Image (cartoon, helix red, strand yellow):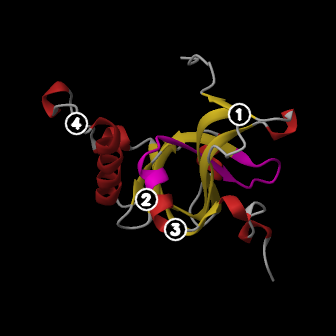
């Protein structure tokens, strides 16, 4: 039986080459994770690192609070990574649109309990974003400081990539004139 998440409506925009997946995941900073709860789905934005060698997404969050109760080992998870590009106009307003690249990942949560593996995963994550900062400029994090943090690894079971670039029918294209909130 075919499941809903096995289908892509716009097959003309589907990307099936693993090179596309790797490129998006290696060049993105944040993702949105979603897990089912009894009342509402839990959706959370977080920074992540992609471990290409093990085909895993690594992220972390606090053990405490609602997320700490819901993001638990062996639970199914969906991860969304999304990048936008130029907006464009067309002859008819209904055909206006925007460029994007996205990857949806399905997998199972694994909370890293082993202390050495947890510290290694945190270092991997840290190196992605802060590896260029000289170690002489800060104190390395410790096991005690990492204690309130859950480190999550999600082995990618299935992924769906999509891409929509500027179509030939576009009349004008531009990046949105938006200012960062922060």
Of marks 1 and 3, the one in the foreground: 1
Which of marks 3 and 2 precedes in the sequence?
3
Residue at (74% x, 55% y) in the render = 36
Which residue was labeled with disc 4?
140
Residue at (42% x, 55% y) in the render = 50
Q: How crowded is mark 3: few (under 14 residues within 10 Å), some or many (20 or more)?
A: few
Kindly report the distance in space between the C-alpha atoms of the residues bearing marks 4 and 3: 38 Å
Which of marks 4 and 1 precedes in the sequence?
4
Which residue was labeled with disc 3?
17
Which of marks 4 and 2 precedes in the sequence?
2
Which of marks 3 and 1 precedes in the sequence?
3
Q: Is residue 86 left or right of residue 141?
A: right
Answer whether labels 2 and 1 touch (C-beta < 8 Å). no
Which residue was labeled with disc 2?
112
Answer whether labels 4 and 3 touch (C-beta < 8 Å). no
Residue 151 appears anywhere in the view: no
Where is 75 relative to 133, above or below? below
Which residue was labeled with disc 1?
171
Where is 62 relative to 51, above or below? above
Answer whether labels 1 and 3 touch (C-beta < 8 Å). no
Kindly report the distance in space between the C-alpha atoms of the residues bearing marks 2 and 3: 29 Å
Of marks 2 and 3, the one in the foreground: 3
Kindly report the distance in space between the C-alpha atoms of the residues bearing marks 1 and 3: 30 Å
Q: What stretch is highlighted in magenta?
A: 23-42
Q: Is residue 1 left or right of residue 175?
A: right
Residue at (29% x, 54% y) in the render = 120
Kindly report the distance in space between the C-alpha atoms of the residues bearing marks 2 and 1: 50 Å
């Amino acid at each position: 039986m075919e499941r809903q998440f096995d289908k892509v409506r716009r097959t003309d925009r589907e990307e099936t080459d693993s090179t596309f997946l790797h490129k998006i995941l290696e060049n993105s900073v944040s993702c949105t994770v979603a897990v089912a709860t009894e009342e509402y789905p839990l959706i959370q934005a977080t920074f992540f690192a992609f471990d290409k060698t093990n085909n895993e997404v690594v992220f972390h969050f606090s053990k405490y609070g609602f997320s700490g109760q819901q993001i638990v080992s062996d639970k199914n998870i969906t991860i969304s990574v999304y990048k936008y590009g130029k907006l464009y106009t067309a002859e008819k307003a209904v055909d206006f649109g925007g460029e994007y690249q996205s990857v949806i990942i399905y997998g199972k949560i694994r909370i890293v309990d082993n202390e050495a593996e947890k510290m290694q995963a945190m270092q991997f994550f840290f190196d992605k974003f802060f590896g260029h900062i000289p170690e002489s400029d800060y104190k390395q994090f410790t096991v005690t400081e990492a204690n309130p943090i859950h480190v999550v690894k999600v082995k990618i079971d299935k992924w769906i990539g999509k891409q929509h670039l500027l179509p030939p029918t576009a009349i004008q294209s531009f990046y949105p004139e938006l200012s960062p909130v922060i």
